[in-house]
Amino acid sequence: MEITKHFFFNLSLLIIILFFVLVWADKSSKFRFSKGCSLFWFLFMMWICFQFSYQPDPHYFYDLRMIIVIIGGLYAGIGPLMAVAVILMRGFYGIEPGFYTNIFLYFPLGIILWRMYPWFWRQAARKRIRVAVLMATIISVLTVITMEISIPPQNRFDAWFAYLVIPPLGVGMISYLIEFAKRNLDIRENMVRTEKLEAVEQMGAAISHEIRNPLTAAIGFVQLLQEQKLTPRKRQEYLTIVKSELESAEQVIQNYLTFSKPSLDKIEEINVKKELMQVINILKPTANQNSVEINSDFALLGSIEGDRQKFHQCFLNIIKNAIEAMPRGGQLYIETQYSSSHITIEIKDTGIGMTKEQLQRLGEPYYSTKGSKGTGLGMMVVFSIVRAMQGSVKVQSELNKGTVFTFSFPSYTPALKKNEA
């Protein structure tokens, strides 16, 4: 059973090579090979077949080259190229009777596979495997017949078993591996596509929800403004409300733009202590309403580079969320630390905290810890602004104990900036 042993060894090598190719393709996200890439790998595997072929006679090579030609022709559409390659490769070993037998078998096979390729890919996966196995069986039978006509083998049972069983088996196994990898890739792509569609749906719902409220109010007051008996004072009051609601709708749109394209409109030096004090002064009335005491401990020095307006927007969102996380009152600590390389801003509350799952999803598009009261827009904007200003965010939280946000930004040094320029 020498031929059978060689064929099993040859098949093992082909499957190992194919396995590593599929793993590499999966890791590099390039499973859909170009014809050139496919040709390279199939030629390499064909060379392996010739290198480990069995030669009972100097004029004949017994190997599994037919598997490579069939798989390459049906799955990659390179049947004629594979046929030419196998003929040329066989020619390097001598122009002998085996070479002409090679031409007789593989040249017509290459043309047939090329014509079958479009039809083959229109079939279901299971039918593709069956067709590939059937092609291998037909070629195996023709090979055995040609072998009997030209040089009958000494051990017919060994030769017949090797050619009639192992090539169809090998084609079936390799076809199944390819179909399995392809199916997994299709499932992954469908999941990504579904997630993208879900994100678009969520974005549409969030935009609709956020903009509809101010627009509905504005439309209502515009209808009231159409009344002729309206006093000038009321008219002015309604116009102010309409303007305020439209500005709210504009702010929603601006927030989405900030998230999708977090660019900084104006780059300038930002004094961290001064700007945080302004943010605290804006939110003090809200803190007082919620019985929240704000404690601050700011480093004397510390500047960063960025957009002052977006810096305000970022920390207004964070501090406002921290205050709202303490509906029954509590303590809010805001601290900064300065070093020559970085400035750290720590915001700690004693509120309701978050679960591990909420922490993991924090900053995801349209995810909010406030349930139906929020859309997650604020945290999306915060993360986008911090990234745009070359900063980082770390969040620690525990249920019923509070949450700590730690921001880190590169320090701004005017002297260093001049040297870089």
Image (cartoon, rainbow, N blue to C red):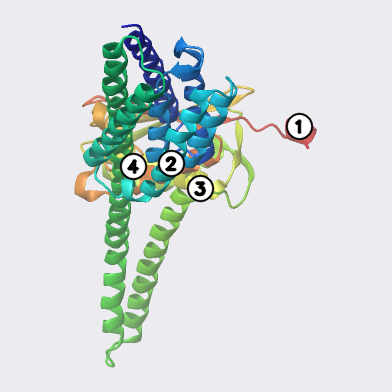
Q: Residue furthest top?
A: 2
Quarter of the picture holding the C terminus: top right
Give the residue number, with chain letter if any, for mark 1: 415
Sooner in the amino-acid sequence: mark 1 or mark 4:
4
Please identify, in this view, whether the residue under mark 2 or under mark 3 is nearer the observer. Answer: 2
Q: Amino acid at mark 3?
A: Pro
Query: Could you tell me if the residues under marks 1 and 2 are in contact, i.e. CB atoms within 8 Å?
Result: no
Please identify, in this view, whether the residue under mark 1 or under mark 4 is nearer the observer. Answer: 4
Sooner in the amino-acid sequence: mark 4 or mark 3:
4
Question: In the image shown, does 133 or 257 lie closer to the viewer?
Answer: 133
Q: Secondary structure at mark 2?
A: helix
Residues packed near mark 1 inside 10 Å, few (<14), some (14 to 19) or many (20 plus): few
Q: Is residue 137 visible?
A: yes
Q: CA distance from mark 1 to mark 2?
A: 76 Å
Q: Is residue 342 above or below residue 120?
A: above
Give the residue number, with chain letter if any, for mark 3: 262
Question: In the image shown, does 164 or 130 lie closer to the viewer?
Answer: 164
Q: Position of residue 17 (x, y in %)?
A: 43, 20
Please identify, in this view, whether the residue under mark 1 or under mark 2 is nearer the observer. Answer: 2
Q: CA distance from mark 2 to mark 3?
A: 60 Å
Give the residue number, with chain letter if any, for mark 4: 189
Q: Secondary structure at mark 3?
A: loop
Q: Position of residue 260 (x, y in %)?
A: 45, 50
> Which numbered disc covers residue 108?
2
Q: Is residue 316 visible?
A: no
